[in-house]
Image (cartoon, rainbow, N blue to C red):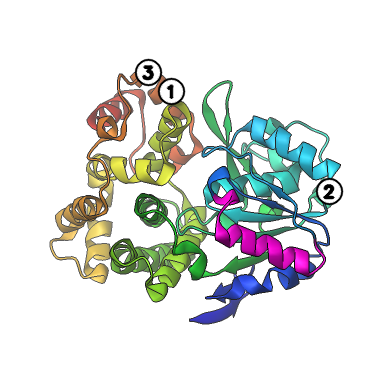
Amino acid sequence: MRANWSYPTAIRFGAGRISEIADACRAAGISRPLLVTDRGLAGMEITRKTLKLLAEAGLGDAMFSDVDPNPNERNVADGLRVYRDGGHDGVVAFGGGSGLDLGKVLAFMAGQSRPLWDFEDIDDWWTRADADAIHPIVAVPTTAGTGSEVGRASVITNSETAEKKIIFHPKFMPTVVICDPELTVGMPAAITAGTGMDAFAHCLEAYCSPHYHPMSQGIALEGLRLVKENLPLVFATPGDLTARANMMSAAMMGAVAFQKGLGAIHAISHPVGAIYHTHHGTTNAVVMQPVLRFNRPMVEERLAAAAAYLGIPGGFDGFYEFVGELNATLGIPANLTALGVTDPDIDRLLSGALKDPSCGGNPVEMTSENTRILLESCF
């Protein structure tokens, strides 16, 4: 399974294609890359191999890995110092959502004079950026979930307010993406599960969003099918490269599809993750069934059609039960309490959910009253 795609950017897809990392950097116009990843990946063999390939090609082996699981503005400041001091001219964003998001922000902020929060995804704030000062990005995902490798934004936590902020610019889109399923084989089972359910959540919320975007609608539906058929396989048999490749495709499809909108799953998981430091994809999975119940009046018919396409009998009820069974198979906690969120501050979570831009794409309007009930049902 090997292909070169040009949508939504240049993608080199297939097992072993990390060997092309140096050529990908040159194609992006990068001669002094900084590889940005998270602490957990920094010492792993796949990372050492990638750095060696860069060094052997005369591109150096510089790395920044002081990245938290939910990257924040302190990580951005530290990374920018390393980037600028090293005279780098582009980023290799390497890893899961945290490494990819931070790497993209470093390339974006490298030449900006305004502070990070001036570029939050509000109205047309992205136009404040100096587009010519954005440095190129090569993205290399090592998980199959966020789809950040084909996204035009990064999620950065404001550590002072414990709020997740979306930083957006069209040039966040990496110039070249290398999708090599071999890089995902060593993921721990819990990360395989959580990231896979993140991809499922992206596709599900995009599919259910009331906004008009038929292209995203179709991509989301096929992404749901790929996750349904392949996530249990990679969870049970980590070395199944065909299933791993299909999950990498589903992750990218979810990120493309959610241009149509996200919804209450993400509106809840963002403040939960920011305040209680839970894994994003796992949090999405935990709150998925409560949100399905919440949205049922507006999505019942649509999800019945999806269930038929996915080969799930029973319409909406069958789809709902499938989600519960999939979560159980993957070892996903039954609720947020079981995930470790004890003594929750419901008022704070409510405020964060209603301020999150994802709530605008939810099929049922989220109000203070109904969202409080929804949040309480997640515990």
**Label 3 Cα neighbours within 10 Å, binned few <14 / some 14-19 / many ≥20:** few
Q: x and y percent of residue 303 in the render?
A: 26, 58
Determine if the magenta segment contains residue 58: yes
What residue is rendered at 32% in x and 46% in y? Answer: 285
Left or right of 260 on screen, residue 338: left
Question: Which of these two is toward me, 8 or 341?
Answer: 341
Secondary structure under tag 3 reads helix
Is mark 2 in CB contact (under 8 Å) with mark 1? no
Mark closer to the chain start, 3 or 2? 2
Q: x and y percent of residue 114 in the render?
A: 79, 32
Residue 234 lies, with reference to residue 328, above or below; the image says below
Q: Quadrant of residue 56?
A: bottom right
Q: Quote the CA–CA distance across marks 3 and 2.
A: 40 Å
**Label 1 Cα neighbours within 10 Å, binned few <14 / some 14-19 / many ≥20:** some
Q: Quote the CA–CA distance across marks 2 and 1.
A: 35 Å
Secondary structure under tag 1 reads helix
- From the image, tell me which residue sits under label 3: 347
- From the image, tell me which residue sits under label 1: 351
Secondary structure under tag 2 reads helix
**Farthest residue, direction left:** 314
- From the image, tell me which residue sits under label 2: 133
Q: Is residue 218 visible?
A: yes
Q: Amino acid at mark 3?
A: Asp
Question: Which of these two is toward me, 213 or 159?
Answer: 159
Is mark 3 in CB contact (under 8 Å) with mark 2? no
Q: Quote the CA–CA distance across marks 1 and 3.
A: 6 Å
Q: Amino acid at mark 1?
A: Ser
Q: Which residues are magenta?
A: 41-59
Determine if the magenta segment contains residue 185: no
**Label 2 Cα neighbours within 10 Å, binned few <14 / some 14-19 / many ≥20:** some
